[in-house]
Image (cartoon, rainbow, N blue to C red):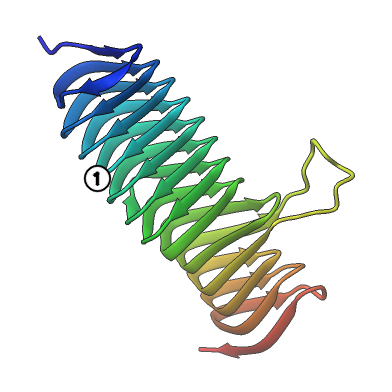
Amino acid sequence: MKSNLIINGSGSYPGGHYDKISVRGEGTIVEDVEASVFNVYGTTEVAESLKTVSMKVLGEAEIKGNAELEELLVMGTMEVGGKALMKKIKILGTLDIKEGLNGDTANIKGSLAVEGDVEYETFDSSGGFEIKGLLNADKIKISLRFGESRAEEIGGGKITIKRKRNSLLPFVGEEGTLFAKVIEGDEIYLENTKADTVRGNKVKIGPGCTIGLVEYKDDFTQDPNATVKMSEKI
């Protein structure tokens, strides 16, 4: 039987294999740690790497090394110093990854910052993100509610980027904007997007976009409220 680790006060604890880890106080786990369930209500730091099946962060968690998780829910803040394999994530708070991030399904309602590349099957964001490398997913759906989201490059099968007025604050005129150097996919629909190059089979440039060059194979349409400097069929 694996033991549980319950941290209520503050202190340092050994790594190793646990069944459940629950942090309600302030605890540092000094080595690599593995657990079935890891719940953080207080503050925790893992000095090396973390491997867990299910993780919930309602407080603050910092993983200095790499993180490997099946399922993650962040309502507080989480930071990973290395790279992260996170199969299914839901971010309502803040997730900050210093290297790359990959998995199956990403649902971002809070904010995501990644220094490297992000690779998922499905990437759905109605929050904000800053990705220093490539965002790559088969299905990409981005709702721009507020602020700026950025990725160096975006690549995928079906890419849909739409502006979304904030229903809680209907009188606030602010909408979100997406910035990317290159957006490449099979089917692309964009609103409120600023990009140097957009390349795809079917490309629809909607309102609020400023695009340098559109390269398309089959089909290209442009909204009258969008700016496209150049377009060519390839």
Identity of the amino acid at label 1? Asn
Frontmost residue, 145 versus 31: 31
The answer to whether residue 110 is above or below residue 151 is above
Q: In which quarter of the image is the N terminus?
A: top left
Q: x, y (%) of residue 159?
A: 54, 61
Q: x, y (%) of residue 72?
A: 39, 32
Q: x, y (%) of residue 68?
A: 25, 39
Frontmost residue, 99 versus 72: 99
The answer to whether residue 120 is above or below residue 221 is above
Crowding at mark 1 (Cα within 10 Å: few <14, some 14-19, many 20+): many
| Quarter holding residue 197 | bottom right
Left/right placement of residue 50 relative to residue 234 reads: left
The answer to whether residue 180 is above or below residue 137 is below
| Quarter holding residue 175 | bottom right
Frontmost residue, 52 versus 70: 52
Residue drawn where x is 77% and y is 43% of the image: 166
Residue drawn where x is 47% and y is 52% of the image: 113
Q: Is mark 1 on a helix, strand or loop?
A: loop
Question: What residue sits right under mark 1 in the picture?
Answer: 66
